């Protein structure tokens, strides 16, 4: 696992990304020697040929990314894989056609080079994917993970590592003091705590994750210290959980762990810097977004009665209440009978136009005014209504802690979890919010904004 943009990225994913960039570039460079009439070296070195190939390669890799093929790279169907790459290459051809229409010849490839190189990509890229999915994880190697204790969180981590092998962490078993035949004991129990040294010598783990439900007078501190100095990584289950799930587990989180944490955000300088670049980004986005906002406003006005903008009180940083602006996506007086309730799937209060505005996230654009006013940031936890904040703060531990930063138009929870209308969904989103607050920074905000574009284009998570 490598930490980029304050996010844990599996080595296998990064290696796939780099290898495919090299392979795609090779396909077009190789095609240049067979399709160009002039000296290909002159084209590549002196006529911006490598730059043009880079543009095509970037558009192809962007298409692959939007198909989630850099995360789910296990091959389930070769036919579907080839269809996906055909679609991706179609996007690359359309981007080249658009650049030609804009009369940017120094950005486009010659016709036959584009055709020849794309043909090679269509053959070699799926073939490389098949080879990579079969052998890459074995070649890159796994880190063997041994669990000391079989608490619910430890078992949840182990199950997740099995389901997502690209993380590169292989669970090899549990060490637990529970007597044989105990209810809920994992089938992969390797022995009891007194046998830990022997189990480590035989299993040779790279990492030991401590996930004991009760540690008092049971945790073998001296032995773990010896194992740590022998080169084996020892970490708490909460740390592993955060690495595997990209969120903070609140079920077993103790207040003292937050109070004495040395890396818990938000850092004051990061918050001030975020306010500054959020303002600049809101100004920059407002101009290209203006036509979409105008069209959205006209559609709302023409298709249902009521105001174009929906104004609603939300809770911001330090529990300050402000008015948030959105394009109205529900019928007028939608909550007159129901009161304040969460939106739900196929909500009858949402207008036909509002459904599409929500799907494409166009209803959120007026929140740029909130960013310019300083009530919100571009990235942050979702702002909730005062009625919900009061109820959720009483029901969910650490919920008020999410109010230590400005709420955002988009956020870590929004791109990683569906739009939730249950208490369980709210807890999961809080865990993502706490991860974001802990790691708040410009690089993470950039990553979230980039991911948000995919969420908008693919209409994910809207209700």
Image (cartoon, grey):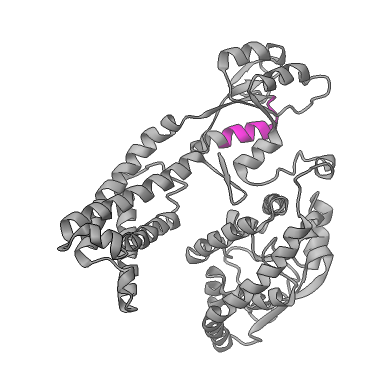
Q: Nearer the viewer, residue 98 or 126?
A: 98
Q: Quadrant of residue 50?
A: bottom left
Q: Residue at x 81, y 56 (%)?
A: 400
Q: Nearer the viewer, residue 388 or 202?
A: 202
What span is in magenta? Answer: 149-160
Q: Residue at x 58, y 76 (%)?
A: 284
Q: Residue at x 53, y 68 (%)?
A: 359
Q: Is residue 52 left or right of residue 154?
A: left
Decide whether residue 289 is among the magenta residues. Answer: no
Name the spot of residue 288 as percent of width and height, x first: 53, 79
Q: Is residue 7 left or right of residue 377?
A: left
Give the quadrant of the N terminus.
top right
Q: Residue at x 62, y 87 (%)?
A: 305
Q: Is residue 271 above or below residue 357?
A: above
Name the spot of residue 113 as percent of width and height, x first: 22, 61
Question: How many numbered circles does the render carry?
Answer: 0
Name the spot of residue 162 as percent of width and height, x first: 53, 33
Q: Is residue 120 left or right of residue 339?
A: left
Q: Is residue 223 above or below residue 124?
A: above
Q: Is residue 254 left or right of residue 247?
A: right
Q: Is residue 63 above or below residue 184?
A: below
């Amino acid at each position: 696992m490598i930490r980029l943009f304050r996010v844990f990225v599996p080595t296998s994913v990064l290696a796939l990304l780099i290898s495919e960039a090299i392979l795609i570039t090779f396909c077009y460079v190789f095609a240049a020697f067979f399709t160009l009439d002039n000296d290909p070296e002159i084209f590549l070195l002196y006529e911006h040929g490598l730059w043009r190939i880079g543009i095509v390669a970037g558009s192809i890799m962007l298409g692959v990314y939007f198909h989630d093929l850099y995360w789910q790279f296990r091959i389930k169907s070769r036919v579907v894989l080839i269809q996906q790459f055909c679609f991706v290459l179609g996007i690359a051809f359309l981007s080249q056609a658009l650049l030609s229409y804009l009369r940017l010849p120094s950005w486009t490839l010659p016709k036959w080079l584009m055709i020849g190189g794309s043909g090679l990509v269509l053959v070699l890229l799926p073939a490389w994917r098949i080879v990579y999915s079969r052998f890459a994880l074995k070649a890159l190697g796994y880190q063997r993970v041994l669990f000391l204790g079989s608490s619910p969180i430890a078992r949840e981590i182990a199950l997740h590592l099995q389901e997502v092998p690209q993380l590169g962490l292989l669970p090899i078993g549990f060490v637990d003091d529970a007597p044989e035949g105990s209810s809920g004991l994992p089938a992969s129990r390797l022995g009891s705590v007194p046998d830990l040294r022997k189990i480590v010598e035989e299993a040779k783990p790279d990492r030991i994750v401590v996930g004991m439900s009760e540690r008092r007078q049971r945790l073998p501190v001296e032995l773990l210290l010896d194992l740590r100095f022998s080169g084996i990584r020892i970490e708490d289950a909460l740390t592993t959980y955060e690495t595997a799930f990209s969120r903070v587990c609140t079920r077993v989180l103790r207040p003292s762990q937050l109070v004495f944490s040395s890396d818990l955000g938000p850092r004051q300088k990061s918050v001030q810097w975020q306010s500054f670049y959020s303002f600049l980004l809101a100004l920059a986005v407002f101009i290209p977004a203006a036509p979409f906002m105008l069209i959205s406003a006209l559609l709302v006005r023409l298709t249902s009665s009521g105001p174009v903008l929906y104004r609603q009180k939300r809770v911001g940083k330090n529990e300050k209440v402000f008015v948030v602006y959105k394009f109205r996506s529900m019928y007028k007086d939608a909550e007159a009978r129901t009161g304040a309730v969460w939106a739900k799937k196929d909500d009858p209060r949402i207008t036909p136009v509002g459904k599409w505005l929500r799907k494409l996230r166009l209803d959120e654009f007026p929140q740029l005014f909130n960013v310019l006013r300083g009530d919100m940031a571009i990235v942050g936890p979702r702002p909730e209504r005062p009625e919900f904040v009061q109820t959720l703060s009483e029901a969910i531990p650490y919920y008020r802690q999410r109010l230590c930063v400005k709420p955002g138009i988009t956020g870590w929870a929004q791109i990683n979890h569906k739009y939730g209308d249950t208490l369980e969904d709210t807890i999961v989103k809080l865990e993502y919010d706490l991860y974001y607050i802990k790691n708040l920074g410009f690089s993470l905000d950039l990553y979230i904004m980039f991911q948000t574009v995919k969420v908008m284009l693919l209409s994910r998570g809207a209700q």
